[in-house]
Image: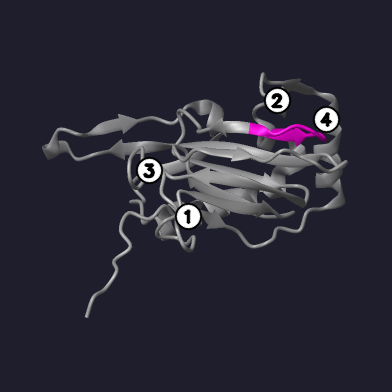
Amino acid sequence: MSTIKKIFPTPIYISETYTLSENEISAAEKHFNNISINTNGNFTTNNKLILETADFVNLKKYIKKCIDEYFYSVLQISKDLKIYLTQSWLNFNTKGTSHHTHFHSNSIISGVFYFTDDNAAINFQSFYPKFGNLSLRYENQNDLNSETFNIKATKGILLLFPSLLSHNVDNNVSDNTRISLSLNTFVSGTLGIYDNLTQLKLRKDEEYE
């Protein structure tokens, strides 16, 4: 009897719903007055260490717990490596703006946390097209043949994924501003194996203690 083995899957972590306090919501909204804009129309905070502020102490603890679960329990990375948050920033998409296709450089695991619900989705693209440069038509779209995957923005949900995974955000057609938080991570400890000539020792910068 034939079988199908799903090899090399890309796990995307979808958290349980975090209950945002009124203080956390108002803190995110007030940062709209301190923003920059990139060339693709997505507004981001000038502060790129937003989770280090006093407004988001509890949210940071929750996100760190989720990162540890994804990194150590789901991906089964050795606990010899210590993962930590590097940068975090708020995104604001007003009506008519979107977020271009991109991935996150100099990061291991990246994530997005939603302060608002939104009908627009975050769209992930496959690392490698299944059939190279051929564009095929499918009778039914499923996890085995799809090269894109969409997740609707849901308030209080954290998504975690490998930083190399390309993604974009659909155009905001609503009158409401979409608010999300993005984050990057890195590791300290020893990568690789000494006898395999792949060992690399990494030290955590004091800024992220």
- Badge 4 density bin: few <14, some 14–19, many ≥20, Cα 10 Å: some
Mark 1–mark 3 contact, CB under 8 Å? no
| Image quadrant where one finds the C terminus | top right
Residue at the spot x=49%, y=38% of the render? Answer: 166
Residue 99 rendering spot, x and y as whole percentages: 65, 33
Describe residue 41's horizontal placement relative to residue 67 as left or right: right
Left or right, 167 with respect to 58, comes to: left
Identify the image quadrant of the N terminus.
Answer: bottom left
State if disc 4 and disc 1 touch (CB < 8 Å).
no
Question: Depth check: 26 or 98 in front?
Answer: 98
Q: Which of pointers 1 and 4 lies earlier in the amino acid sequence?
A: 4
Which residue, given by chain and number where applicable, does mark 2 sit on? 47
Which residue type carries mark 1?
Tyr
Amino acid residing under circle 3: Pro
Badge 2 marks a residue whose secondary structure is loop
Q: Which residue is mark 3?
A: 129
Q: Is residue 197 left or right of residue 125?
A: left
Give the magenta part as a residue range: 90-99
Residue at mark 3 to residue at mark 4: CA–CA distance: 38 Å
Mark 4: which amino acid? Phe
- Select label 3 or label 4 by which is in front: 3
Of labels 4 and 2, earlier in sequence is 4
**Inter-mark Cα distance, 4 to 2:** 11 Å
Circle 2 Cα neighbour tier, 10 Å, few/some/many (<14 / 14–19 / ≥20)? some
Q: Label 2 sits on what residue type?
A: Asn
